[in-house]
Amino acid sequence: MANALVWLRRDLRLQDNPALAQAIADGYAPVPVYVHAPEEEGDWAPGAASRTWLHFSLLGLQRDIEALGGRLLIARGGSLAALERLQAETQAEALYFGNVYEPLPQARDAAVQQAFERRGLTVKRFNAGLLVEPWQVQTGTGTPYRVFTPYWRNVSANLALRAEYPAPRRLPASPGIAGLTVEELGLLPAIAWHAGFWAHWRPGEAGAHELLDAFCEGAIAGYKEQRNLPDRTGTSKLSPHLHFGEISPQQIWRRIAGLRLGEAAQADLAHFRSELGWREFSYHLLHHFPASAGRNLNPQFDRFDWAEPDADALARWQQGRTGIPIVDAGMRELWHTGWMHNRVRMIVASFLCKNLRYHWLHGARWFWDTLLDADLANNSQGWQWTAGTGCDAAPYFRIFNPVSQAEKFDPQARYIKRWVPELQQLPTPLVFAPWQRPELLRHAAPDYPPSPMVDLGESRAAALAAYSRR
C-alpha cells in the first residue's frame, strides 16, 4: 500500500478529519505529519498562551494516533522543505491537508501544492475548519459581503452539511524515520505561568466533546440571554477547541440539529448558530481583505486621532489595575485562565479604544499573546467591531459604559468579586463604581486603585470630539 502524507495544522483530531479519512478511502496508508513553522505566519506567529494549548493538544493527538497503531511525525519548518524531506523518506505518493485561511499561510500552502504537483504527486485539499469556504459566498453582484446579516442569511439559506467523515479504526505503523518529540518544539515557557489554566481546560479532541456534551445538556437552553452573563457558564467555551480544529463547526452544527428541545429553546439554538456564523464571517472578511489583520477595514479611521499610548497606562489595563472593577475583572480572568467572557471582551475593548483612545491593535496584540483561543480572523475582526473601524461595526460613538454594563450583566457582582476579590467586603451596589465612596474603598480595599485611571465622562467626550474631527 502506498503512503500519503496527511499534513495536520488546524485539524488536530481523528473524527471528521476530511484529509485523513479521504487518504484512507483513496487506498493510501496515511502518515500523519505536524510541521512547526511559526515563522511562516509573520507578525502573527502563535502567542504564548496559544503555544501552551498547542503543546497539550499535540500530546493528546499523538496518544490518540498511537492508540490506533500509528505515529504522529513531528518536524520543524520551513514547511515545504520539511514536507519534501518526509515525502522522500516515506516514499509518499500524495499529500492531503485541510485549508487554513490566514494570508501568509494561504500563500505558503499554494506554494507547497504547486511544488508537489510539479513533481507528479497527488495533492488534495479540504475544508476542515469552517461551515463554508470564504470564497464560496458572495453578494448578488459577485463581491464579498461587508455586513453580517445579509451574509448569514445567504449562508443559512444555502448551507448543505456534508456527511461526517469517520474516524479510523486503526492506523498503519508509520515508517521508521526520525521525528521530533512535542517537548522538542519548546512550546511551553520556562516558568509555568500557565499552570492555572488547566483547572479550567482539557486540550484535545476528547476535551472538546466533553464541553460540547455539557453545553448541549445545560447552557444551550437559555443561551440567548445567559450568554451575556459572565458570572455563570452560559456559553459553550468551545473557541480554543475550534481554533485548533479539535472539533469542527460541522460537528457542532450536526449535534445541535439533533437536539430535541422545545419551542421555547428555538431562539437559543438560532442565536448559537449565529455565533458560529460570526466566526464564519470573520474568516470571510480576512480572506477577502487580508490587510484587515493589522489595518482598519474602514479607511476613514486611518486619519483618526488615536492617543499616543502611555506604557504605564497600557500596563494597568493589561494587568487589571484600571480602577474600574468590570474591566479589571475581565483582564484578570484572561491572565489566570487564558480566556475572557465575550461580553466582557467588548467592555474591556471599548475602554481601551474609546476611553483611553488607544488604537485597537494594542489590544489585539495583547489578546493574541494571552488568549488560548487566539484566532487571527476572530481577534482582528472582534477588535475592529468594538473600535468601530471595521465592516458591520458598531458606530465609533457607541461607547460602552463599564459601570452600567456591569450593573446590567453582573447585577450581583459575583463575577467582579471572583476576579477582584479585594472588593468582596464592599456592599454590592458600590462594587460597580467604588470610587464613589472613597473612604469606604480605602478602608475595605486599601490596595485597590482609589479612582479610575481616566474619568469615564470626560474620556467619552474626548473620544466623541476626536470622532468628529476624523
Image (spheres, rainbow, N blue to C red):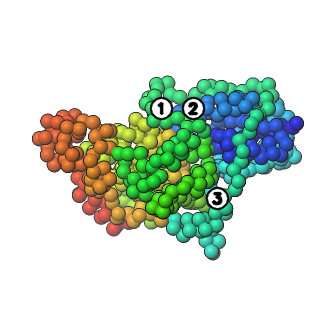
Find the residue positioned furthest to the left: 439
* Foreground of the two, 293 or 68: 68
Q: Which residue is mark 3?
A: 132
Q: Amino acid at mark 2?
A: Phe
* Residue at the (81%, 45%) spot, across then down: 25
Residue 73 is situated, as x and y percent measured from the top left of the image, at 72, 31
Q: Amino acid at mark 3?
A: Val
Q: Is residue 244 shown left or right of residue 94?
A: left
> Is disc 3 placed on a helix, strand or loop?
loop
Cα gap from disc 2 to disc 3, whole angstroms: 28 Å
In the picture, the quarter occupied by the C terminus is bottom left
Q: Which residue is mark 2?
A: 56
* Foreground of the two, 447 or 237: 237
Label 1 neighbour load within 10 Å: few <14, some 14-19, many 20+:
few
* Residue at the (47%, 52%) spot, across then down: 220
Cα gap from disc 1 to disc 3, whole angstroms: 32 Å
Q: Which residue is mark 1?
A: 198
CB-based contact (under 8 Å), mark 2 and mark 3: no
Q: Amino acid at mark 1?
A: Trp
- Compared to residue 157, the image places residue 345 above or below, namely above
CB-based contact (under 8 Å), mark 1 and mark 2: yes
* Foreground of the two, 379 or 247: 247
Cα gap from disc 1 to disc 2, whole angstroms: 10 Å
Q: Earlier in the sequence, mark 1 or mark 2?
A: 2
